[in-house]
């Protein structure tokens, strides 16, 4: 007995994907069965084996039924074992109504074979992120919220480390994200080289947290931190290029891919060598600024983010705003889908994922044409810097240095050590220089005695 698959059945499968769980595997197995053959142009026919079977709701007796050309099936490649019944069919995101049956099948298999660009199925996803920015800018708070930890944030002394784990799918190892936090603002730039190495450069990202409530520190902090980080990353990539050019070129190519090749700014930007997210913190204070000041700061950060191929988000202690920051960070840390929503209104918190802004939408620097004409700049970034610093004169680097003595911080108190240090300070008049001088002289005396007491063999 012969049964035919009518076009309505096929259309229901491709246009209404919610139904595909009911019959996608059996349907594809039937299509690839030796008993299935294509008779004539545009017809599909199935021969039942042995006993007769009553036609179901999607079948019709006798004859043949034309199948639309866009639903004609090519030969199934041998690399699709699940279509032949060897294992469950993979899942995929909601397809478009315009997708053909075969488009859906191929997309599902490729997604199963390559669930992520950087990790094979069964392997552990391992990423590293360095948080840096203004001192007391809210970096620790953001990290704790991303890791869903209910802890009271403590000041970061130098370079601190923590980690988080997430399960990507059922019965797979937990993915790991390493979180590094640089404290002290710009006073400990040399520590940036510690977490970023040649071993993790392909899986490393940077989150720059800028305190929106301190616009006079904003550009200096951003420039110093990004410049030191970029120089260090470029040194690592230069060394890798000598031994493994493909690996060295991969991070920069990924950053380039954030922008479509037909984007009008593709040749005008200078992407950061590794993924970068810029977070403007303390938006609740920033929102109280004059509207013109907010506009200048917002436009400037939009330009810098777009120029570096970075994502930009404004946040505060508000749970709703922190959630937006978590979306971008979780994308870097665990490969979660990043939101494609955009908010560019300067009167509202900005949210712009990488590659979704443009120079035409940002507009020119917020200054008159006459003022811009008087400014000498070699690059667009330098021009924006001059315009920004005209409104917000920067603080000197010395003013941004952390002058607080960590030894006096109560969170690092150790009773025995503190007692001994107090005794030395009393002897030397509480002068650290005198303490160090006394220790040096004591060392010299001990060394001199030890040399005099030594017995040397005479030949």
Image (tube, grey):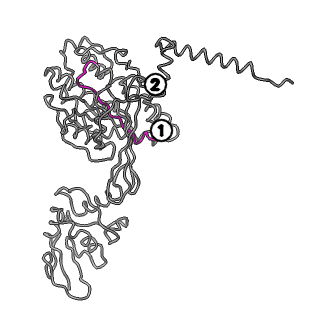
> Where does the image place residue 60, in percent across and percent down from the top left?
13, 79
* Quarter location, residue 313: top left
x 23%, y 78%: residue: 46
What is the quadrant of the N terminus in the image?
bottom left
| Of the pair 112 and 246, the residue shown nearer to us | 112
Q: Is residue 208 magenta?
A: yes
For marks 1 and 2, the one nearer the N-term is: 1
Picture layout, residue 205 above or below residue 216: below
User: For the residues carrying marks 1 and 2, which lies nearer the camera in this image?
Assistant: 2
Q: Is residue 424 magenta?
A: no
> Where does the image place residue 427, in percent across and percent down from the top left?
51, 13
> Where does the image place residue 364, in percent across and percent down from the top left?
20, 23
Disc sitting over residue 233 in the figure: none
Question: Of all residues shown, which one is farthest toward the bottom?
Answer: 51
What segment carries the magenta color? 198-216
Describe residue 215's horizontal placement relative to residue 164 as left or right.
left
**Which secondary structure lies at badge 2?**
helix
Disc sitting over residue 418 in the figure: 2
Bin the neighbour count of mark 1 within 10 Å (Cα to Cα): few under 14, some 14-19, many 20 and up. Answer: some
Disc sitting over residue 198 in the figure: 1
Residue 260 visible in the current orientation: no
| Of the pair 397 and 10, the residue shown nearer to us | 397
Picture layout, residue 114 above or below residue 371: below
Label 1, label 2: how far apart the Cα atoms are? 39 Å
Bin the neighbour count of mark 2 within 10 Å (Cα to Cα): few under 14, some 14-19, many 20 and up. Answer: few
**Which secondary structure lies at badge 1?**
loop
Q: Are marks 1 and 2 in contact (CB under 8 Å)?
A: no
Residue 368 visible in the current orientation: yes
x 25%, y 33%: residue: 312
């Amino acid at each position: 007995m012969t049964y035919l698959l009518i076009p309505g059945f096929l259309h229901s499968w491709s246009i209404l994907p919610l139904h595909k769980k009911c019959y996608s595997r059996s349907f594809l197995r039937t299509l690839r069965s030796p008993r299935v053959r294509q008779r004539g142009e545009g017809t599909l026919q199935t021969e039942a084996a042995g006993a007769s079977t009553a036609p179901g709701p999607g079948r019709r007796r006798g004859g043949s039924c034309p199948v639309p050309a866009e639903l004609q099936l090519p030969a199934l490649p041998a690399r699709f074992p699940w279509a032949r019944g060897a294992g469950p069919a993979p899942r995929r995101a909601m397809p478009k109504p315009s997708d053909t049956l075969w488009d859906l099948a191929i997309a599902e298999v490729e997604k199963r074979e390559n669930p992520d660009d950087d990790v094979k199925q069964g392997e552990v996803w391992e990423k590293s992120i360095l948080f840096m920015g203004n001192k007391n800018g809210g970096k620790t708070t953001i990290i704790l919220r991303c890791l869903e930890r209910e802890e009271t944030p403590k000041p970061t002394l130098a370079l601190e480390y923590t980690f988080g784990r997430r399960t990507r799918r059922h019965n797979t190892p937990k993915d790991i994200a390493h979180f590094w936090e640089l404290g002290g603002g710009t006073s400990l730039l040399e520590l940036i080289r510690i977490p970023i190495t040649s071993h993790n450069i392909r899986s490393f990202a940077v989150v720059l947290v800028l305190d929106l409530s301190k616009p006079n520190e904003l550009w200096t902090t951003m420039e110093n931190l990004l410049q030191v980080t970029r120089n260090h990353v470029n040194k690592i990539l230069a060394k890798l290029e000598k031994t493994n050019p493909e690996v060295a070129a991969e991070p920069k190519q990924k950053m380039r891919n954030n922008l479509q090749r037909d984007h009008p700014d593709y040749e005008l930007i200078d992407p950061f060598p590794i993924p970068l997210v810029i977070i403007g913190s303390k938006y609740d204070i920033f929102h109280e600024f004059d509207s013109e000041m907010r506009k200048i700061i917002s436009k400037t950060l939009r330009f810098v983010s777009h120029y570096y191929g970075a994502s930009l988000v404004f946040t505060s202690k508000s749970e709703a705003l922190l959630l937006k920051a978590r979306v971008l960070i979780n994308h870097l840390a665990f490969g979660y889908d990043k939101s494609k929503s955009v908010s560019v209104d300067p009167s509202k918190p900005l949210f712009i994922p990488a590659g979704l802004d443009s120079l035409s939408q940002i507009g020119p620097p917020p200054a008159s044409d006459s003022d811009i004409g008087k400014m000498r700049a070699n690059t667009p970034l330098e021009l924006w810097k001059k315009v920004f610093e005209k409104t917000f004169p920067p603080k000197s680097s010395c003013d941004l240095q952390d002058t607080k003595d960590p030894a006096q911080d109560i969170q690092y108190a150790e009773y025995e050590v503190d007692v001994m240090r107090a005794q030395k300070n009393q002897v030397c008049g509480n002068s650290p220089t005198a303490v160090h001088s006394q220790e040096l002289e004591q060392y010299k005396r001990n060394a001199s005695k030890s040399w005099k007491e030594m017995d040397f063999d005479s030949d």
